[in-house]
Amino acid sequence: MLSFLLLCLASGANAQDLFLSSGTPQALPPTCGGNYSLGPAPVYPSPQSGQEGPGTGAWQKVDPPAVGLKKAQLDQALDFINANVKKRQCFLLIKDGKLAYEWYNADAPDPPEYPFGKNWKNNMENKPHRGYSMTKTVGGFLLLLAATEDGLDLDADITKQYGVKSPKPYGVTLRMMMSQVIGGSNRPGQEWRYDELGDMWMHLFPEILEKATGHRPSYYYNRLHTSLGLSKSFTWPKVDTEFYEGAAGSCRDWARFGQLINNKGMWGGKPLIAAKYIMQMQQPVKYSPMNEYANPCYGLLIWVNSDKAKVPGCCWEASRLPPPHCGKDTFLNGGVHDLTLNIGLYGQVAMTLPSKNVVVVGFGNDLRPIEPARIGYYPAVCKILGLPCSNPPRVPETKCGEKIECTGVAAQCYTGGNWAHSEPVDGKEKCLKCFQERLILNLQKFPTAREMVNGSCPTKTKDKAFAFMNCYCGVTGVNSNPWAPWPKSLPKLLNPRPIVPSPCPHPYPPPPPPPQPPLCLLPPKCIKGLQALASSSCFPPKMNHGSHCYKGIRIHRETLMGKYGCPVLLDQSQPVLASKAFCWCGVPPPKKTSYAALTNGEEEEHGRLDEDVLLGEGETKGMAKPEDEDSSALLSSRALSAALFERARDTPVPKPDPVTCGWDGTRPSALDRACHNIHEGKVLKHDGEKKVSDAMKYCAQQCLEKDQQPCHCGTIDKCLGPRLGTGPKCTRCFTIMVRCLTTVCVEECACGDHDQCKKCGDTKKTKFNGHGYQTCSYHFRACAGFSPKVSLLRNESLTSYFTI
């Protein structure tokens, strides 16, 4: 036996490799449901001396011909990648442990919330790139390093062995957690589920590591950092608490992890991580009595491309929406089976091709839920490396006017927040509720989520945002999954089927639910204020009441912030989906909207006027008709002033700020005394104070109904002009008044109390640009040309109104 071992070692075999029986059940004590089996171990030659990479030094740069490649072909590969994957910042190819090709683009935009500054244009080789979920794989290396150096047992029950509470009612091991096969509640291997946010079981890794070894994760991180020769650019600030994301480093840094796989754990001529663990990292896991692998395309915290003839089961992706790869289909159809993919959000990838001793690295800003190696990196390099090639799949079209990036961001809520192991069905109200409850939490936990949503989803107007969610969630009857319908050839039962149906014993109580954050992240006093106003106001901000709730929050803004200590619930400068009001009010029922005319990512411009506000002269659609004896006078007033109004239409109105209409001090001098002339005077005198007041009140309420924000001057102009019968300049003065009152005195005026509104307009002062503190009445008088001491054409009845 000794002579056999010496002979094998002399041939280059590693002693640990000799005892790794890949593809056979491991002789372990029975776990819940049975023992595990590993998929076939990847077979590839070990790199020769000098092909293992840089050790702790810098990468050795060589010309492509030095490693058997052609620069022109690599240039073509780069062009293919940039044509199929968006906004790339780097592309590296490592061959035989040497840097054979390197390209950077300093002009490509960074992902949102990039924390490392902007001065990298002349130093792109050291620019840090966030890995996002690539951090999970780096965390896997830390666990395997601890297993190599300090005996961390991947197959020990974490509760019995280490005193860590099981995240399931049954006993779980690190191998189960790393392979993510504990998505089901009865036994391991029942369902695969990706712990994308690290809050299902990955959050336990730091605790397990410390209790098993006495060392915190940072101890092994520092050892790995030093041993691999990672640069100062590589950082992981929360390594002791968060394993799901947080690591960042240069493209050259990320390539070292790929080379470590190609080296089977060797680095700098010495074993860093035991070869058996690097091999197991690339092998999917099956737990008996299951007769399929829960995910044949996932190893231990890394993606693989297994031979499905040897590893049966359906390959699932992190997104819930694409169909699984069942039958012979695998993660990358047509590709070699020994590759690994360390992938992260925004199209970040480090791909290893061990049989060719190649590492391919690419970073950039592509948020699409489309695997970049599948559509870009592998088909770009396969031919020039002499590997079998694949046909890149088509990128699907969206169905609700959003970009495909938005589809990926929203995928978690599509079915209502649950992982579907059959073709996902839109969750309708549950989906909307998921958006409402989760988005605000994600915005707090991940500041990048704000840009992810705003940059790719239809959020520029509230109507567009709500229409998208109603469509995406299936409320309008649209199947919005871009990958729907799934192929009919898929098996009816997509989750692995147990050979023995008996349930697994549950030795542990179910884990307690995580502590719940405050409702909508609001302080208790604010919640009480919202509830109080919901029961007492004519515009109640009642929870889950859609448009009426938003209107109530806007109207009672000052009271909520001043009296009840609420934060800003509805910031007009931000999309409604980014507001706490969205969590409180929810999604209004859908309007009748056709999505057939919407193109991918198309949105209408902000400030579009609703049809029932754009009323022509004499139209009364949706208008409350006057019921007193003078109602005929209002209508005859329009008829008598029709000619005057038509003449006045052609008079150009100066264009101040399109939102504020000039009431904040930017009103042009051309509007001074705009109503103080014989034409408008006759019209207003004929109408009388009550008719003018009713028109202003109606248009103000219409504005609040439609916009749920400070009223647009264009909206008010269109509403007031036909009702007053005045020309554009004079109408604009009344518009300024309405705009001012619906901003400064919105609580006092919204419910129609004329006296209360008048008092507020006369007395409540606000600081305006360049004009000190002034009232709404002051701005109206300056524009229209009236004052409390000067009546309009001696019409005393109008004077009191004009001082509101």
Image: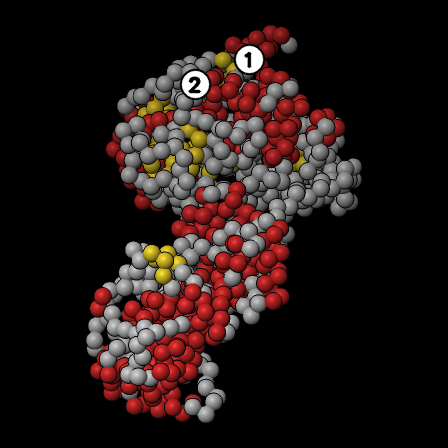
User: Residue 102, relative to residue 463: is it above or below?
Assistant: above
Q: Given this view, does label 2 or label 1 mark the residue nearer the observer?
A: 2
* Residue type, label 1: Cys
Which amino acid is tagged 2? Answer: Gly
Q: CA distance from mark 2 to mark 1?
A: 31 Å
Q: Which mark is residue 229?
A: 2
What residue is at 57 percent from the left and 8 percent from the top?
Answer: 6
Q: Quadrant of the C terminus?
A: bottom left
Q: For this rendering, which residue is in front, 281 or 335?
A: 281
Q: Which residue is rendered at x = 51% and y = 20% of the image?
A: 222
Image check: 28 left or right of 693? right
Q: Is residue 507 visible?
A: yes
Residue 666, relative to residue 101: is it above or below? below
Q: Is 457 located above or below residue 673 in the figure?
A: above
- Direction from residue 777 to residue 257 in the image, left or right: right
Please give the name of the residue rendered at 31% of the width and 40% of the height, measured from the top-left corner. 108
- Image quadrant holding the N terminus, namely top right
Task: Name the residue located 66 percent from the left edge and 22 percent from the top edge.
Answer: 212
- The location of residue 574, given as percent across then percent down, is 42, 54
